[in-house]
Image: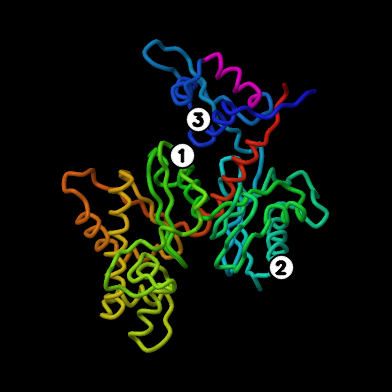
Amino acid sequence: MTQVELGDSARELAREVLIHGPISRADLGRRLGLSPASLTRLSKPFLDRGLFVESAEAVQGATGRPARPLDVRVDARRFVGIKLTGEAAYGVLTDLRATALAQVERALDGHEIERVVEVIAGLVGELAGVGAAGVVDDSVPGGVGLSIGGNVAGQRVVTRAPFLGWRDVPLAELLEARLGLPVDVENDVTALTTAEQWFGPARAHDAFAVVTVGAGVGYGLVMHDRVVTTPDTGLGLGGHLPLDQNGPLCLDGHRGCSTAMLSIPSICAQVGIALGREVGYDEVLELAAAGHPAARSVTDAAGRALGRMMGYIANLTMVDAIVLSGEGVGLWEVAGETALTALAADRDPEATPVEVLVDSTGFASWARGAAAVAIQGALGRLRLPA
């Protein structure tokens, strides 16, 4: 039987059902600008292949006409999502809606490319039964998504990954050769923003921003229900917004930028200098919560900087919801009120209030976002009967 690739309309239909399902055909038609006949034609191959299901019948509108919303069949495929940092790989096995079914974490014992590929392969094997020989059972996933801090070209090549010291690494190709599975690689903040769009606290918004605080500072944006990306996505441009003219220097020499004010290493270094010893992030937050003057001074300054950063974002993009995430999100517990005060001070008093949504789920959301990237990639490559 002749097979053809999905057209743009079919890919858009699949995306809408993935993100917003269960969704009525009437809503799909409005969102996609398609007629009922076109929706029936486009959805039929997905229904025939068991990727879509029709939800329980409901009454639609005042006419009482029955409607059967479309949804994905979540158990139709499984996928692996991996968040790669400079220290570890965090993996999840998910269903077709990126719901985590199992989680695994493996430490990196070096940054050599071959060694990292082996660690990732072992993690995938543990999650889904894929070994050196490739497929070993029927539970093999439909694809692997991997998110990494850095710049990625075409979801294939890591052009720059500062935390790993990598340049121009064909990571998708290397992993596909090792696993025998399709692999999609994406910038980690882009993948996390995809996760927030699919299942995060801002899912109901068609426009919102994501700010991540951790080893660095990241920034993602959704506009008109689309994750915004450019060739410069992954360069960490949001990490160097000037926020405090009296703040410390970042490693690139920017005084008081978002990285200098908000990243975990900088916050720990500032408190460590004041205490005359090394200090970890958890201890900084504990000291600040207890009112220690040195720690409190640093976290208050960080809170003001965070509020100013969110003010910049809201004022320039005109979003009214911002998701705060990352391994440094505990800062919100001790400096959230300070941040909100600074945010309000940088907004017009008559502007729509900005809703700050805190996602403290940790690296699980990042890995699930990588799985969501793989799911979208798999559907984009899907071939259906002509």
What residue does disc 1 label? 226
Magenta part, dominant SS: helix
Query: Colour scheme in the image?
Result: rainbow
In the depicted structure, whether residue 377 falls above or below residue 51: below
Q: Residues at badges 2 and 1 in contact (C-beta under 8 Å)?
A: no
Q: Residue at x 49, y 58 (%)?
A: 235
Find residue 287 and report its horizontal and vertical position in percent.
33, 77
> Is 13 left or right of 140, judged from the image as shown?
left
> Is 158 left or right of 131, judged from the image as shown?
left
Give the number of the mark in front: 3 or 1. Answer: 1
Q: Residue at x 40, y 56 (%)?
A: 211
Classify the position of the N terminus by image quarter. top right
Query: What separation in Å lies between label 2 and label 1 (alpha carbons)?
Result: 35 Å
Find residue 120 and report its horizontal and vertical position in percent.
68, 60
Q: Residue furthest right?
A: 133
- Which contiguous range is marked in magenta? 36-47
Earlier sequence position, callout 3 versus callout 1: 3
- Crowd around label 3: few <14 · some 14–19 · many ≥20 (10 Å): some
What residue does disc 2 label? 115
In the depicted structure, whether residue 349 falls above or below residue 20: below
Classify the position of the C terminus by image quarter. top right
> Is 264 left or right of 78, judged from the image as shown?
left
Element marked by disc 3: loop
What residue does disc 3 label? 22
